[in-house]
Amino acid sequence: MAYLQRAGIARKLGSGLIARALVLPFAFFALMHLPIESRAHAADAKSCDGNAGLTLPKGFCATIFADHVGAPRHMAVAPDGTVYVNNRNRKPSPGGSLLALKDSNGDGNADIIERFGPADGGGTGIAIYKNGLFVDLGDKIVRYDLTPGDIAPKGKPETVVSDIPVNGDHKSRPFSIDPKGNLFVDLGSATNSCQQDNRAEESPGIDPCEELKTHAGIWRFDANKTGQVFSPAERYATGLRNAAGIDFDDAGRVFATQHGRDQLYENWPKLYSSQQGTDQPAEVLVALQEGGDYGWPYCYYDGIQQKNVLAPEYGGDGGKAVGRCAEKLPPVAAFPGHWAPNDLAIYKGKAFPETYRGGAFIAFHGSWNRSSGPQQGYNVVFQPLEAGKASGPYSIFADGFRDGDPKGVEHRPTGLAVGPDGALYVSDDAAGRIWRIAYNG
């Protein structure tokens, strides 16, 4: 696992061809009669100058699909290309906290934006399944009917799962729905490391950690049913501090990212150096197994040693002792500490080159807690996968979010979605932007 590799492959693409004014009316008429995939490709070919501030591998093109739309979190794209967004508004929106965006003229930008849902009820998770739009609204997951011809849902939603705990440090409820209707929901931990006094220096861990009954794991429900109520009985996997990204591959394997714990150095300065607090623990990608235990809070993954080690709250000695962690499941891949993997998209499209198909795109929100700095992340990484395992080192696919904006605006990747044409959408909840990344060859 290439924990220390940080590949920045990419050069900005040259400007696209600009049609002569004489033929513009005829070009527009022809463009409107192309299928959505061809129209989008035509738009990409002419509007790719500068990649909207991003750095990408050669052959890829980024355009701004929408801008200043609030705090967009996760996204889902319908077969007709409509992009649905769970929008965590910073203030109530009279039109609703959820977004439906559509590019009706094929120019690569959303020219129709409709709001719906509760004014102040936005969250993170969102997915499309069987003509229904499933949305995380905090303590519940609801389903809106998607009606052909309507951009935004018009009817009231049905509650799929209610009474979901939302207390503690991690209140987002990301989820994913596989083709069988398995609804996998992340319930992040209520604390940093299950200490008796949360985030306090040298406070010991609670053993056993009681919050594992209702937090720090993946719960499985049925997307084909309504009226389900949360209970500990539906827990699918445990020991995941905050699995903010969940997705599945074509073979039905389910993967999740995990935010590693914070404050090794700050809470245990006698055991860890500031540099160790910067580097550890690794962020990880795991393959979910029913009944699997991935170690939190008793263990964390040391990306340099490439193994689970005992946490200091439970007798750890700065990364040497393993103890009970030898029995915990290891990750598929590991990444630098504190980058904050906020979403995951297994690429099941066909528009990108063969090397990307079946691999994992991960949106890293960026760090705030690398002890000795500088803060890092703020990028989209690609991790190649084969048969459910890492098939090579990760590379940085998209960069420049934090410092690529000519106006000096900071952007932080937080959501990913793949459209029916194979384009990759990236949301930014810091400045309210959504990019569309396509491959032009």
Image (cartoon, helix red, strand yellow):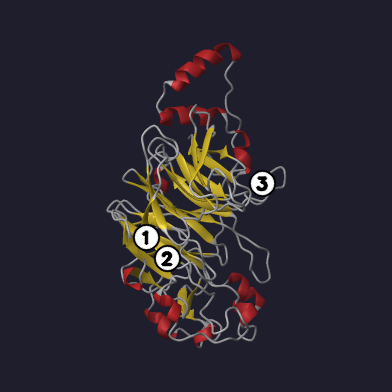
Residue flagged by tag 1: what amino acid is it?
Val
Between 173 and 279, the one lying in front of the other is: 173
Check whether the beta carbons of the residues at disc 3 and disc 1 lie within 8 A of each other.
no
Q: Residues within 10 Å of mark 3 (few under 14, many from 20)?
A: some
Residue 344 percent across, percent down from the top left:
45, 55
Q: Residues within 10 Å of mark 2 (few under 14, many from 20)?
A: many
Q: Residue furthest right?
A: 407
Residue flagged by tag 2: what amino acid is it?
Ile
Between 224 and 334, the one lying in front of the other is: 224
C-alpha distance separating marks 3 and 1? 40 Å
Of badges 2 and 3, the one in the foreground is 2
Residue 121 percent across, percent down from the top left:
51, 54
Element under label 3?
A: loop
C-alpha distance separating marks 2 and 3? 38 Å
Element under label 1?
A: strand
Residue flagged by tag 3: what amino acid is it?
Gly
**Residue position for label 2:** 164
Q: Which mark is residue 161?
A: 1
Check whether the beta carbons of the residues at disc 2 and disc 3 lie within 8 A of each other.
no
Question: What residue is rendered at 41% in x and 65% in y?
Answer: 163
Q: Which mark is residue 357?
A: none
**Residue position for label 3:** 404
